[in-house]
Image (tube, rainbow, N blue to C red):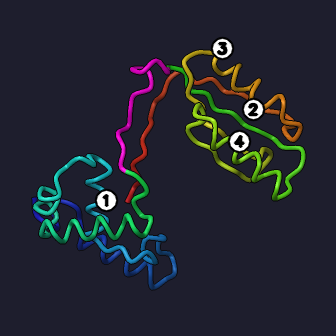
Amino acid sequence: MSLTTGFGFEMMDRCAKIAHRHGMGKENLSQGLDSYDLAILRILQQDCTKPQRQIGEIVNLSTASVQRRIRRMEADGVISTQAAQIEPKTVGLPLTILVEVELRAETAGRIDDIKRSFQDAPEIQQCYYVTGEVDFVLVVIVGDMSEYEALTQRLFFPNDNIRKFRTFVTMDRTKSTMQLNI
């Protein structure tokens, strides 16, 4: 696979330069990422176990250069973790629930407290502090409704700062990916 046809580096570089000149660049421009870094990231998102030698062959870099770039991106926080994405149903967790949480008071300390409680709950896979009519949106993955009820009894009902929460039980997971469009 050639460098230009495989990942569109030339076009990506031109677009990135234009976007940067006009102040429209993604944050990756300020991170110092170039087209090789982005190509490496795309490959790692698809298969983080791919040997660095093979990555180097795909993007036309030496293995040592690929290794240096990956280490730099890890140190810079661009790569936060390398992990397998597990199908929840295969490990007895077939139920995905979306939860909107509305708080009574939005003081910095109370928000930090609720964030910590959400971060500490293993059932909560994703937690977003959002704008709008609610304060948090959670993605919860559990084995069944009794596990979800136990979570609500543990986290929501005893917390006097939670005004209300609304639950959306998913019927089908149409798309679930952690891959970014880079």
Mark 4–mark 1 contact, CB under 8 Å? no
As shown in the figure, which amino acid type bears the numbered disc 1? Leu
Residue farthest bottom in this picture: 21
Asked if residue 139 lies in the magenta stretch, the reply is: no
- The residue pinned by badge 3 equals 146
Mark 2 lies on a secondary structure that is: helix
Q: Residue at x 70, y 48 (%)?
A: 115
| Label 1, label 2: how far apart the Cα atoms are | 36 Å
* Residue 155: mark in rendering: 2
Categorize mark 1 by other alpha carbons within 10 Å: few (<14), some (14-19), many (20+): many
- Quadrant of the drawing holding the N terminus: bottom left
- The residue pinned by badge 4 equals 117
Pointer 3 or 4: first along the chain = 4
- The residue pinned by badge 1 equals 41
Q: Main secondary structure of the magenta part?
A: loop
Residue 140 at what x, y percent from top left? 60, 31
| Label 2, label 3: how far apart the Cα atoms are | 14 Å
Occupied quadrant, residue 17: bottom left
As shown in the figure, which amino acid type bears the numbered disc 2? Leu
| Label 3, label 1: how far apart the Cα atoms are | 39 Å
As shown in the figure, which amino acid type bears the numbered disc 3? Ser
Pointer 2 or 3: first along the chain = 3
Of badges 3 and 1, nearer the viewer stands 3
| Label 3, label 4: how far apart the Cα atoms are | 20 Å
Categorize mark 3 by other alpha carbons within 10 Å: few (<14), some (14-19), many (20+): few
